[in-house]
Image (spheres, rainbow, N blue to C red):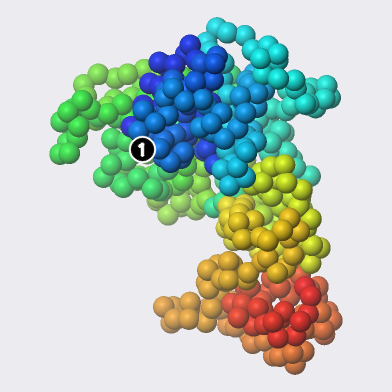
Amino acid sequence: MAAQNVENRTLLSACKEFHVVRFHRCPEFVSTPGEGVLAFDDQGLVKGANRAALKLLGYRDHEAVCGQPVERILDTSFATLMRLTGHSSYPAEPLSSKLPQRRWFASVHTPAGASRPAQASAGPSVRTEGEAGAAEARGPLDCLESADPTMHSCVEILRRVVDRDISVLLLGETGTGKGYCARAIHNASSRADKPFVTVNCAAIPETLIESELFGHKGGAFTGATREGGMGRILQANGGTLFLDEIGDMPLALQTRLLNVIEDREVMPLGGNKVVSVDVRVISATQHHPLDLIARGQFREDLYYRLNGITVRLPPLRQRTDGAELIRKLLHDEAPGTLFELEPALLERLLAHGWPGNLRQLRNVLRTMLALRTSDRLTLADFNEEWLAGNAAQGAPGAAASHPERDGESVLSDAERDALRRVLEMCQWNVSEAAARLHISRRTIYRKIHRHGLLRHAQSLRAGTGESE
């Protein structure tokens, strides 16, 4: 990942005199080390590309790309690329493609010191004056806005501190959008043109995280490269350092991190001279920091230093804008396509608890779109097995490794057995069971999935023909 970051920065620096398109299939990966980067001149001929671009586009080497028309490489028009120049680089915008199976999200940057090209060279704009004004007024944090009161409150708090030298701590379950939120804060700030570097403290092995964070001199440890490594903190110098899953950082390194934040200096591993750094720190965790402190797994002084302002992102099951989110994600996955969403399908999606939150919902919608037969989405396009992995946690066998079961588990099993009996009495007719239990159909579906009754839930439509 560090090598990709260096390669991208080197290419961008070397191609300042050219137009640059930064693209990926997923908008959240644009402006990250995994993005594709293509540089092209005023005639639309490709002058440079990074390895990620070659991989995304399916080319083996640079010779196959360089010198070719960029519109042929990306299966889009030169006018479309030119219309993206001058737009805000965040979020990445959908790039209309001649081939629907090759959809990209992209941002396009003009050569350094050049003004935006005249529309004559790019073709007439199809946007109305009102649409253009709305697009220019749309900022990074606007993408987080929603009708949900809790989420709206979070965004308003972030607006007030976006350019303040205050550390931000993002709390929330996995998949609630903490990484997306961190990038939005960076892109809305005055540091937007500087690096945004992510460190997943839970993904890097404990033996390597110190050198990954602070860098190392050549030969500092067995396996260290001869030229040494810069480290993520120095890579983020001038920009933003996002420490994801900070609660999983080894306790010994928390002291060093605290010193870096307090003193604005970093000492590479094996070095003997400190290096001054200027970084904005945003951290995130799915754990409760105070619980970690009570268990001795997190330093209290580091918590108070990171906790300049805390924003707790709500889980999907607690948000009131579920229908809006589903439609927005569908638009993001297939921009320009107008989907007709069957009310029964929408109700089924809203009924699920979504333990994986937005990440899980996006993946389910992405699978549904890939397998659809038309732009009208119905229950026939949805498969309960896509959710089976999450429901398995509530299956009877899941408790086998816990011989001493508490009262809550006993009550849960009692509810499960009672729910199964009522559903069997009603021949698995959800509407009739809901009426007997005096609860909503949505609640019935949620309990079915919580208690691992998916196999029977699938027989609702197959066996009884009932429409959800």
The image quadrant of residue 54 is top left
Q: Amino acid at mark 1?
A: Arg
Choose between 429 and 224: the one closer to the eye: 429
How many numbered circles are shown? 1
Question: Residue at the spot x=57%, y=38% of the render?
Answer: 104
For the question of whether residue 64 can be seen, the reply is yes
Question: Residue at the spot x=71%, y=73% of the render?
Answer: 445
* Left or right, residue 218 beside residue 418: left
* Residue 413 placement (x, y as % from top left): 60, 83
Q: Quadrant of the C terminus?
A: bottom right
Residue receiving disc 1: 60
Circle 1 SS class: loop
* Residue 266 placement (x, y as % from top left): 33, 24
Choose between 23 and 299: the one closer to the eye: 23
* Left or right, residue 387 beside residue 278: right
For the question of whether residue 260 can be seen, the reply is no
Q: Farthest residue toward the bottom?
A: 425
In this rendering, the answer to whether 34 lies above or below 444 is above
Choose between 218 and 364: the one closer to the eye: 364
Question: Residue at the spot x=55%, y=7% of the render?
Answer: 113
Choose between 342 and 74: the one closer to the eye: 74
In this rendering, the answer to whether 319 lies above or below 194 is below
The image quadrant of residue 423 is bottom right
- Report crowding for label 1: few under 14, some 14 to 19, many 20 or more residues within 10 A (C-alpha): few
Q: Quadrant of the N terminus?
A: top left
* Residue 50 placement (x, y as % from top left): 40, 29
* Residue 408 placement (x, y as % from top left): 59, 76
Question: Residue at the spot x=62%, y=71% of the render?
Answer: 384
